[in-house]
Image (cartoon, grey):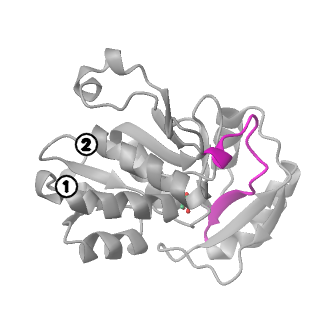
Amino acid sequence: MSSDAMKKRAAEAALEYIEENTVIGVGTGSTVNYFIDALSRIKHRLDGAVSSSEATTQRLKAHGIPVFDLNAVGPLPLYVDGADEVNAQLQLIKGGGGALTREKIIAAASELFVCIADQAKRVEVLGTFPLPVEVIPMARSHVGRELVKHGGQPVLREHCVTDNGNLILDVYNLAILEPATLEARLNNIVGIVTVGLFAQRPADVLLLGTADGKGVKVFGRDRAAHGQYAKNSPEDR
Ligand code: 5RP
């Protein structure tokens, strides 16, 4: 089975976390694109979405789904987004699509963060995928030197300007054994806008699309302890 088919399975399973007449947060990437396409089937039950990128905004609007400013509608009950890597604690590396800053803001402003991914994204230790870091352009060299002091090898992402007008450094060779500690340390480097580590605010639920007959594995928050999400939540399947 292709990774696209597994992404689609995870994306479709996330529909079951949506409550009637709510505004939800929507992430960015190829897995989320499957989610947006699926969302269009139930858009009459949704008030709209807060988008994490210009690309996602365009796709939502193309499906006739209203897009709202977070300031007008937050906090949100639900955020659905993909990931580049996810560990057993549901801590993530994100930003492969360059949308990490808005993604992190929406995750912070959401009650439930449902991560959708194909099985290849599940790792023991974060850091094989180079860690994306969004930087203010004039701080690029300074931040690069600081990242080297932390043991990483930063590489400027070519031909990439974020939706916020900034640059991305992809940091190689970090074995991230303590994700929340590293996130806090890197957050202290002047000139960094956002670190693509989502450890201090990890996902609450992981829907992992698999190649086997079960289709989607569910990890994370105990649904029985969170009644409003329990009634329509997917079982492991
Ligand atoms: C974008 C992201 C994406 O969620 C991440 O890159 C995964 O993308 P895909 O679903 O295409 O594999 O963080 O900034």
Q: Is residue 53 above or below residue 85?
A: below
Instruction: Report, in whole angstroms, how far the alpha carbon at label 2 lies from the one at label 1.
Output: 10 Å
Q: Position of residue 131 (x, y in %)?
A: 71, 55
- Residue 228 highlighted magenta (yes or no): no
Say what amino acid the circle numbered 1 marks: Ile
Determine whether, in the image, residue 139 is placed left or right of residue 145: left
Is disc 1 surrounded by few (<14), some (14 to 19) or many (20+) residues within 10 Å? Answer: few
Q: Which mark is residue 18?
A: 2
Q: Which residues are magenta?
A: 119-136
Q: Position of residue 42 (x, y in %)?
A: 19, 55
Q: Residue at x 61, y 58 (%)?
A: 2
Q: Quadrant of residue 227?
A: top left
From the top left corner, tell me how far across and down residue 231 is, in percent.
Answer: 24, 25
The foreground one among 132 and 42 is 42
Q: What residue appears at the point 79 percent right and 64 percent down from the top-left corner?
A: 144
- N-terminal of the pair, mark 2 or mark 1, is 2
The reply to whether dot 2 and dot 1 touch (C-beta < 8 Å) is yes
Label disc, if present, on residue 42 of the rendered structure: 1
Residue 31 visible from this viewpoint: yes
Label 2, residues with CA under 10 Å away: few <14, some 14-19, many ≥20: many
User: Residue at coordinates 27% horizontally, 50% vertically from top-left?
Assistant: 24
